[in-house]
Structure formats: C-alpha cells, structure tokens
Amino acid sequence: MTADLTIKASETGAIRVFALSMTDAEATAFKGDAASITAALGVEVDATHVEVFPISDLEGIGLSGYLTEGNAVPPEELAPDRPKLDRLSGWVMIVFSRAFQGRAATLSPIPTLTLIGTYGMPGVDWRATEVVASEAAKPFTAPPSTVKKRPSDAAMSGRVATVVLILLGLFTWAIIWIAG
C-alpha cells in the first residue's frame, strides 16, 4: 500500500511509476479508462497522460530503459532504483505531471497500487511571495539627464539637405512664375 502523495500545482516534468498488483484482466480494465484510473488514484486525472501496460511490452529495453530513453529521465536519477525497476514484472501505471492539469492534488492510491518511484524535476514555483515596496524597484526612478545631446551627423546632414531642397523648389517656382 502507498501512503497519500501530495502534488503541487506548479509541478511539471515529474513521472510517477506504480506497480499494479492485480490480474491481467483487472489491469487491462485500467487502459484508457479515466474513471478506473481516477478511482485507483483517488483524484481526478486526465487519463491521456497516464500509461498502463505490461512490462513484457518493453522487451529488449526494460522499464528503466523506457524511462531513460523514452521519457528522458536522467540515468543517474534512476541509478538507486534501477535494480528494483529491472526486477519488476506484471503491469505498471505511469502517471505524468500533466495528468493533474496544473492543479494541486492529493493522491490516495488503492492498496493494489505500489509507488515504485517519482522521477524528473517537480519544477520551481515562480510565483512571487511578497511585493517589493522599495522606491528603487519602481519604474523610471533615475534622475533626468541634465546634459543635452548634440544631434548626430546624419541628422544634421538631413536637415541641410531639406533646407537645400526647399530653396531649390522656391527658386524653380520663382523662375517658372517670372517666365510665365
């Protein structure tokens, strides 16, 4: 039997592996059945982020290989549990953090579910716990600059060119007006 497990709302990237101590028929009933999975875990979950399968399906790579190769769990994180994972037989249930849909939850698994391990990083809660009230934390607190910036050479060239074009336009207009 597994004790209650608390899931934080901020959890991402964690994978929980449960061994199923039940017959093939009972375990098969869990595959894709959201109501059965919810009842077994004691909390509503999105069943599309829960995998239920026999370990025999992982022939050649084993459960630890599936977790490292198929789910990017670092091998050093699995190292302490690798012997236990490799000895498992029967059925397993893998519950991904996304199954909780970003909500805090408390799992109360049924006695036939045994938590083998939780792998991956639970994530950091980035929410602010306090508001900074310092004057320096407010926007635009720097004193205004007292030095007046000199216009760039490109700006000066543009102004000169504008004045020259205006004078040329006036000169052309004056010639046309006098000639006309």
Image (cartoon, rainbow, N blue to C red):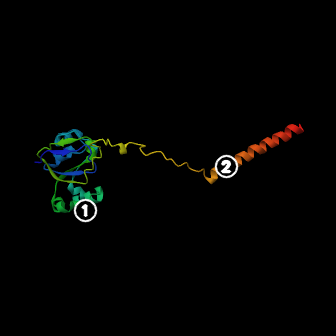
Q: Position of residue 180 (x, y in %)?
A: 89, 36
**Above or below, comparing residue 170 to residue 81 in the picture:** above
Residue at the image position 16 percent from the left and 62 percent from the top: 83
Which structural element holds mark 1?
helix
Residue sitting nearer the eye, 29 or 81: 81
- Please state if 76 lies on the left or on the right of 157 as rendered: left
Residue at the image position 85 percent from the left and 41 percent from the top: 175
Amino acid type, label 2: Gly
- Please state if 50 lies on the left or on the right of 159 as rendered: left
Q: Is residue 49 visible?
A: no
| First reached walking from the N terminus: tag 2 or tag 1 | 1
Residue sitting nearer the eye, 172 or 15: 172
Contact (Cβ within 8 Å) of mark 2 with mark 1: no
Mark 1 — residue? 75
Amino acid type, label 1: Pro
Which numbered mark, 2 or 1, is in the foreground of this view?
2
Q: Is residue 12 visible?
A: yes
Q: Position of residue 161 (x, y in %)?
A: 71, 49
Q: Residues within 10 Å of mark 2 (few under 14, many from 20)?
A: few
Residue sitting nearer the eye, 153 or 48: 153
Residue found at the very far right of the displayed protein: 179
Mark 2 — residue? 158
- Please state if 136 lies on the left or on the right of 103 as rendered: right
Q: Position of residue 117 (x, y in %)?
A: 18, 54
